[in-house]
Amino acid sequence: MKDAERPRLGVVTEAFANRPLIEVMDWLRASAPAITDLEIGAGGYAPTGHCDLPLLLRDAAARKVWLDEIDARGLRIAALNVWGNPLHPDESIAARHDGDLRGAVRLAALLGVDRVVALAGCPPGAVGDRTPHFAGGGWLPYLESIHDAQWDRWVEPYWSDVAEFSVREHPQLLICLELHPGTVVYNVETFQRLAALGDSLAANIDPSHFFWMGMDPLAVTLAIGDRAGHCHGKDVKFAPANLALNGLLDRRWPLSPDAMPWNFAVVGRGHDASWWTRFLTQLKAHGRVQTVAIEHEDPFVDAQQGIPEAAELLARAR
């Protein structure tokens, strides 16, 4: 790809949630100079030590100081991340995560950031349930029809409203939803159903989730096309002996990693550079991805080793 067509490299700063953002940025400039973009947690379940959402929304001076520190290091904010569950049956959790999502949309408008990363959430299985219910299959009588009932009662009304809110507050913004098991959007079929609710709803493409589910990320990116708005750089490595015994669905994940049939891995440790080159070329050709943000979740490799390693491979693969 020509330089003008190459996606920028970023990092999800959650890997360094216990360190101040200034310290993280200085480390990135010294250890992974190919990284120019930041994806910063702003609410939901994401740690918010790098982004005080209420403060930045209300205080223009604080916002300027925060942005100036980022600009001074030649970095930029590619996305705010508010992964959470705004459909949670616990109303206090749902209200907080919904507020964080809407707050992130407003803050993105103030910052000139055009991507917010989120999860679609998971509602109860029926009215009165106290916990979320992932309707991942309908092959038994007590699982039948739950999926459609969830969409009719909770999913479609909520996300239609959020899509309209986003267009009003920040017309250029894409809310990029991770296709993730445990939420109502986890594959192409469920994403396309949600995307039909509004043009501001897009996909955050994370190949590791597709490897984990036995899907083909190349086929997924073709099917989703220009509704792909953001990307996470993360791999999966399988343990054949464990996989043979327990398959891909393992309720113990992520502990203990040694016993798991699969684990998230540093980019390149599950699939080689040639695969990542094909993936990034196809993603750029068919989607609207501006940044590939490295999300470090490899349980066997420290982030300070894994992120520079991933950045080096992705810089070549672009």
Image: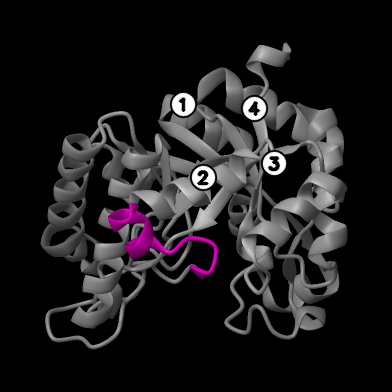
Disc number placed over residue 73 in the picture, else none: 3
Which quadrant holds the N terminus?
A: top right
For marks 3 and 4, give the one nearer the viewer.
Answer: 3
> What kind of residue is marked 1?
Gly
Look at mark 1 in the image and give the residue it sits on.
225
Marks 2/4 in contact by CB < 8 Å: the verdict is no
Q: Would residue 197 be found to the left or right of residue 53 on screen?
A: left
Q: Secondary structure at mark 2?
A: helix
- Image coords of residue 88 (percent x, y): 27, 75
Query: Residue at the location (12% across, 54% down)?
Result: 157
Q: Rounded to the nearest whole Å, what is the CA distance between mark 2 and mark 1?
A: 32 Å
- Image coords of residue 132 (percent x, y): 31, 78
Disc number placed over residue 67 in the picture, else none: 2
Instruction: Identify which residue, 213 or 164, lies in the foreground.
Output: 164
> What kind of residue is marked 3?
Arg
Disc number placed over residue 7 in the picture, else none: 4
Q: Secondary structure at mark 1?
A: helix
